[in-house]
Image (cartoon, rainbow, N blue to C red):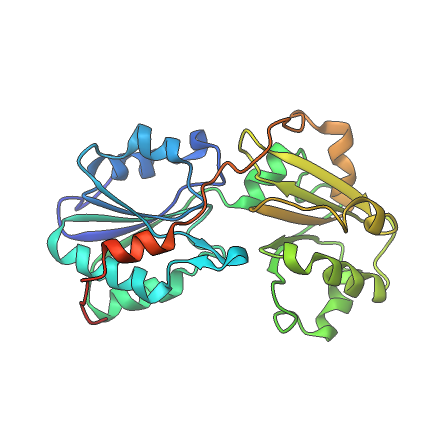
Amino acid sequence: MLQNVDSPKVFLIGAGSGDPDLLTIKAAKILAKADVILCDRLVSHTILELYASPNAEIIYVGKECSKKQSVPQEFINQLMVEKSLNHSTVVRLKGGCISIFSNVLDELEILTKHQISYEIVPGITAASGASAYAAIPLTARGYAQGVRFLTYYDKEVIPEAYFKDLAKTKDTLVFYMSLGKLSQLVEHLKRQGVSSSKQIAVIEQATTPYQKVYTSSFEDFEEKLAQQKFISPSLVIIGEVVGLHEKFSWLENSSKRGSYFPSVAVKNILSNYEKLNYAV
């Protein structure tokens, strides 16, 4: 049950991994009452069409780092503070889960600094959505007893010494935002003696009508995946559990081409709010 939804508050909401039907009931109830929605790129437009209040002001503040088309975090913080001063219910709507690789810390700090009330509403993270729709259980008896959520967008993110542990662990490894360094990631693990029983899966645009799943052994990576051009967002799963995909897959790869999520029109967003000058 929602509490204090009529008092000024910012709701930090995870919209799920793509499929609009994966939105939580709580999130849908809050969206129906929202005055302002600050929406990330990786949120299905169907969610806004079905659940957002028809009177809500919707502002797209997405990030597409691979194309250098991102609304600066400082600008998002500024908008969040400014809108909360004049509206009772402001929603910061993010793809996936609000607590996993969503840059939520910056937003929590700015809300706390300005003594703005907030609530965190979780969503289905990409790892859960992608693994389920690809029929790759992240843990499975005899295959993996644990799972690690990681990212490798820069060589400094994971020190070389840690790759030895990653190569030897029985845990399933899930890499977010790592496509740009996928070949380097694979090379690191091979150099540390990763087991031949482990496989690599790339799930492209998971849980959307455009979903495609690609798998490979480490030995065949160069031939099967290294030259593939994947569309964002794509998630990487590494481990013995990847071998279960072929046996249990319940969803065929989509024949659709293109992107389910629109690109970010950063210049238009910034120009529309160029007079926003609240000091954060």
Residue 28 visible in rendering = yes
Q: Nearer the viewer, residue 54 or 192?
A: 54
Snapshot quadrant of residue 28? top left
Q: Is residue 142 visible?
A: no
In which quadrant of the rendered image does the C terminus lie? bottom left
The structure residue drawn at horizontal position 33% and vertical position 39%, both measured from the top left corner, is: 27
Left or right: 124, with 104 as reference point = right
Answer left or right for 263 relative to 111. Answer: right
- Could you tell me residue 142's position as x and y percent? 78, 43
Side of 172 relative to 74 (left or right): right
Q: Position of residue 140 (x, y in %)?
A: 71, 41
Count of numbered tags? 0
Give above or below for 208 relative to 65: above
As displayed, is residue 254 above or below residue 109?
A: above
User: Residue drawn at (43%, 43%), measured in percent from left and top?
Assistant: 123
The picture places residue 99, in percent across and down from the top left corner, at 44, 55
Residue drawn at the location 64% of the way across and 41% of the way down:
203
Q: Is residue 167 above or below residue 5?
A: below
> Which sits in the foreground, 135 or 95?
95
Q: Residue at x 70, y 28 (%)?
A: 249
Q: Nearer the viewer, residue 223 or 159?
A: 223
Location of the N terminus (image quadrant): top left
User: In x, y percent, where is residue 56?
Assistant: 20, 39
